[in-house]
Every structure is written in C-alpha cells, then in structure tokens.
Amino acid sequence: MTIDTVDKKTVGRLKSRPQFLAVRNGEARRGRTFLLEVLDRKEPEEAPRVGFTVTKKHGNAVERNRMRRRLKEAVRQSAGFAMKNGHDYVIVARREVLTAPFAELAAQIAQRVEAKPRPKRPE
C-alpha cells in the first residue's frame, strides 16, 4: 500500500432521488458559488456520501457537465478527507462555478464541509 491510498478516504455517491430529497431536510451551508446541504444519517460506521446537483437554468448540457466535473474534482482533491462518516452531502451548483478559479472553489468547498453546524431557529 502506498501513502496515497492510506491518506485518502473513500466517499460514496448519492444516486437516487429519495436520497437527495432526504438531505434537503438537513442543514444548508451557503457558499459564494454553491450551496452545500448536509444531513447526519446517525450512522457513524458508514462512509460519507456526496451528490451533485446542477439545474437546467445554469446552461446547456456541456456547461452543466463541466460544472459537475469541477465540483467532483474539488471534492476529490480537498474536501473528501474532511467529510464526516455517516453524513450525506449535496452540492448544488451556481453558475459562478464555471468562472471561479479552481483553487478558490476547492478551498470554499473544504471550508464549508469543515464548518461547524449552526443550530436551527425554532419555527
């Protein structure tokens, strides 16, 4: 085993619509170029899972796929290690993901993932 494989944490993927909808009930952390939704599944032994959402209003298929690829790579490089076991993360892209410098995008994602959860306001 090399050092690279020891340090990397495997992050699962959210694949079905009910999984994405469940995360909407969690906490929302706003970034300049994206919205990060976080849900604690209360399963600390399970690996974290991540999903990406890019809506049609943000461009054609080529642009949406480029946004998704940039977000995936930013998570792989900088934020995967900070994701907590038993949590689900959904990153909802904004149009600015296309033009933001990649280093800044990766830093923002890592910062939002590591942010402490804020208590919800009573309704």
Image (cartoon, rainbow, N blue to C red):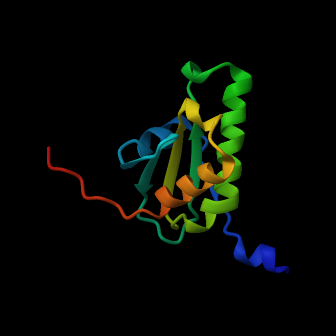
Residue at 29 percent across and 58 percent down: it is: 118
Indicate whether 56 appears above or below 44: above
**Furthest residue in direction left, as rendered:** 123
Residue at 35 percent across and 61 percent down: it is: 117
Indicate whether 71 appears above or below 2: above
Residue 71 in the image: state x and y as whole percent.
64, 45
Q: Assign the N terminus to one quadrant of the image.
A: bottom right
- How many numbered callouts? 0
Left or right, residue 109 beside residue 1: left
Residue at 53 percent across and 35 percent down: it is: 17
Residue 59 in the image: state x and y as whole percent.
63, 20
- Of 60 and 23, nearer the camera is 60
Indicate whether 104 appears above or below 55: below
Residue 103 in the image: state x and y as whole percent.
66, 53
- Of 4 and 110, nearer the camera is 110
Residue 79 in the image: state x and y as whole percent.
60, 60
- Of 63 and 18, nearer the camera is 63
Quadrant location of residue 70?
top right
Quadrant location of residue 98?
top right
Q: Assign the C terminus to one quadrant of the image.
A: top left
Quadrant location of residue 97?
top right
- Of 71 and 89, nearer the camera is 71
Left or right, residue 122 beside residue 114: left
**Furthest residue in direction right, as rendered:** 1
Residue at 41 percent across and 64 percent down: it is: 42
